[in-house]
Amino acid sequence: MQKTKVIIDTDPGIGTKEADFDDGVALLLALNSSQIEVVGVTTVHGNVPVSVGTKNALRLIYLMKKQIKVAQGASCPIILDKPEKMKRPFVEIEDIPKFTPSMEDNLVSEFAPQFIVDTVSKSKEKITLICIGPLTNIALALIMDPQLKDKIDQIVIMGGAAFYQGNVTPVAEFNIWMDPEAAKIVFTSKIPKVMVGLNVTQKVGFTKKDFLHLKDNTDPLSKLFYSSATTWLDYLKKYNLQECYMHDAMAVAYLLNKDLLTAQKACVDVETQGILTRGQTIIDIQGKLGKPSNTWVCKDIDREKFHKMIIDCLRF
């Protein structure tokens, strides 16, 4: 069976204290898959500053002993700077493998949007983009090369919320909220798209018990994932939350087993002007906008199968 060629665009928090680590699980799931060929990883601002995310990605790939090109991308949204509330210190977790110069072996000098343009354009097969961070790099790539849309198989987006509350504002999900203008460019493009939003990712929770099997392992990967999981879950306690979600990993899971998720075709657009609704994904399933459907919007998930997929992935 021919593998699906993918570029993963991400804002990895794994390895950073109190940061989401589901992006690391997504990378682990993809890089260990026999169905997916990861031809590159691009980093973007989001959960952590892009320079921190790049180091986190390089560390994980190094510890997995993979040879995957990593290109650093946008450090801020295409129009507005990061919201002030996102400016906080980002500290490396103490008991994980320290970053060393050798971990930079997979780093390329190209700016991530240019790397996307070049890699997609030169590929004999169409490439799928798995986007699990703000969509700044993807929007810039589409602006740089408008013909790129004909060479991308599909874009799988972890972002937005379909008829569901947001996780940053009452209506906006983090990845979309961080760069609504970029998200609007991507969603209104004519490239086939799949949206994996909060309405499905928050149906499957994970607690500290799910990661206990990693606690006594001495290998570097186990330490990285266990420490990242526990510091993130400890951080969530501040908000009276006892579980975390594998948002980003679900986007990869969609490619691995489409039967896990049910989806409905809809027209998706992004609100960029609203004072209260900036960053909201508008899901039109009734044609009220008078525009054609442009996205498969995921509506439900097989909870047990997805939970098992993630736990199995973390058995090193």
Image: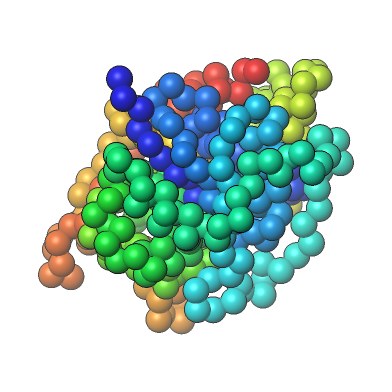
Q: Residue at x 15, y 67 (%)?
A: 291
Q: Answer with left or right where residue 129 lies relative to residue 294.
A: right
Relative height, residue 67 to residue 217 (above, below): below
Q: Answer with left or right where residue 50 lies relative to residue 193.
A: right
Please state the horizontal and vertical placement of residue 82, each as a whole percent of the image. 61, 72
Residue found at the far right of this picture? 94
The quarter of the displayed image where residue 294 is located: bottom left
Please state the horizontal and vertical placement of residue 201, each as a whole percent of the image. 46, 42
Can residue 280 be spotted in the picture? no
Relative height, residue 255 to residue 16 (above, below): above
Q: Answer with left or right where residue 124 lies relative to residue 166.
A: left
Please state the horizontal and vertical placement of residue 163, each as a whole percent of the image. 34, 56
Q: Quadrant of the N terminus?
A: top left
Please state the horizontal and vertical placement of residue 66, each as a whole percent of the image. 60, 30
* Front in this rendered view, residue 96 or 306: 96
Q: Residue at x 41, y 40 (%)?
A: 6
Can residue 218 be spotted in the picture? yes
Q: Residue at x 59, y 33 (%)?
A: 67
Q: Residue at x 65, y 18 (%)?
A: 316
